[in-house]
Image: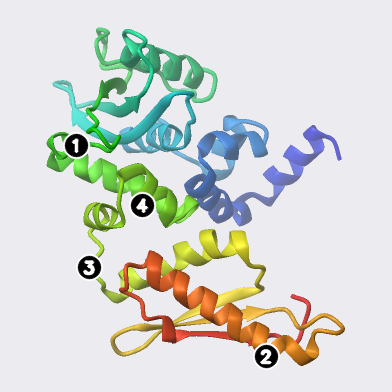
Amino acid sequence: MNLKKSIRKVLREGNSLQSKLMQMMKTKGVDVTSKIVGGFDNLNKILKLDLDDLDVQEMLVKNFINFVEIPEIEVTGLEIKKSSSGNRIINILITTESNASNIESWLVRNIIEYLSGVFTFPIKAAWEPAFGGKPKISLSSELVEENDDGNITESVLSENKKTSLKEKLKNVVETQGIKMGVTIVGSLEKLFSILDIKGTQEDMIFLVKSIMDNEVEKQLKYCNYDIIKTLHSIKLYVFVAKPLPGEEETFDRLLNAVEEFISNLIYKLGGGLVRGHNVYVYNTGTNC
């Protein structure tokens, strides 16, 4: 099936794809999602977005920035400010090892140039004048400090920056795992502090989902899993494929080993908030 036929098929499916594409935007970003359906115009036809709405424009631009990969530059968070005209300024907080001068303005101009070929609404640099109230979205960038360990210093984490950093880190933990979050901020304790992890049931579910979808999935093949709430905690049920021929005699020991592996990983990466003995591994009796 050629590209045009694929696009027609996607467009005919209409509303049935909306939830899937919105979820894809959350996990892969608007740029990748647009390319899958043949461009942003096609994506907008399916999602039926109001591109004149300021909140929609802000959501799309923030989504793009949260997923963009730029050599030698790490986006650590976003600040949202209101301009005097009531429009939005998205300030991109970055760290870099590059010694290039004016890297903040270079970043802003390159993002605007790229997005001019993606979105149909205009975006400008915050330092440029606006006429007639347009564009509604402006971009700026700020190079934040790092300490000797390469971690973001507490002095730059104002309440607004903490909020934007929390959103960024939550997305990282959901899509790339807790280890990646720790790599960014320097320690599990600091990561939990920024994410406001305190050991509630919702925190436990968030942590276990991240560990299963990232760290466990990279090392262990399983069919699926289910998280069940108990009175004060949770239980994790992991389902694996039936044993291969010749593995039947040792399969029970293998299940015990898998259970121990997942339990230890969850206890370690969950900072002890999720008890390892609440993990159960079962044979589905199928090949998944």
**Image quadrant occupied by the C terminus:** bottom right
The residue lying toward the viewer, choosing from 114 and 217, is: 217
Q: Are marks 4 and 1 in contact (CB under 8 Å)?
A: no
Q: Amino acid at mark 4?
A: Lys
The residues bearing labels 4 and 2 have C-alpha atoms spaced at a distance of 36 Å
Label 4 neighbour load within 10 Å: few <14, some 14-19, many 20+:
many
For the residues carrying marks 3 and 2, which lies nearer the camera in this image?
2
Q: Earlier in the sequence, mark 3 or mark 4?
A: 4
Q: Which residue was labeled with disc 3?
A: 198
Q: Earlier in the sequence, mark 2 or mark 1?
A: 1
Residue 103 point in image, percent of width and height: 35, 13
The residues bearing labels 4 and 1 have C-alpha atoms spaced at a distance of 19 Å
The residues bearing labels 3 and 4 have C-alpha atoms spaced at a distance of 14 Å
Above or below: residue 30 compared with residue 117: below
Q: Amino acid at mark 3?
A: Lys
Residue 53 visible in rendering: no
Q: Earlier in the sequence, mark 4 or mark 2?
A: 4
Q: Earlier in the sequence, mark 3 or mark 2?
A: 3
- What residue appears at the point 48 percent right and 31 percent down from the top-left corner? 68
Q: Which residue was labeled with disc 1?
A: 153
Label 3 neighbour load within 10 Å: few <14, some 14-19, many 20+:
few
Q: Amino acid at mark 2?
A: Asp
Q: Which residue was labeled with disc 4?
A: 170
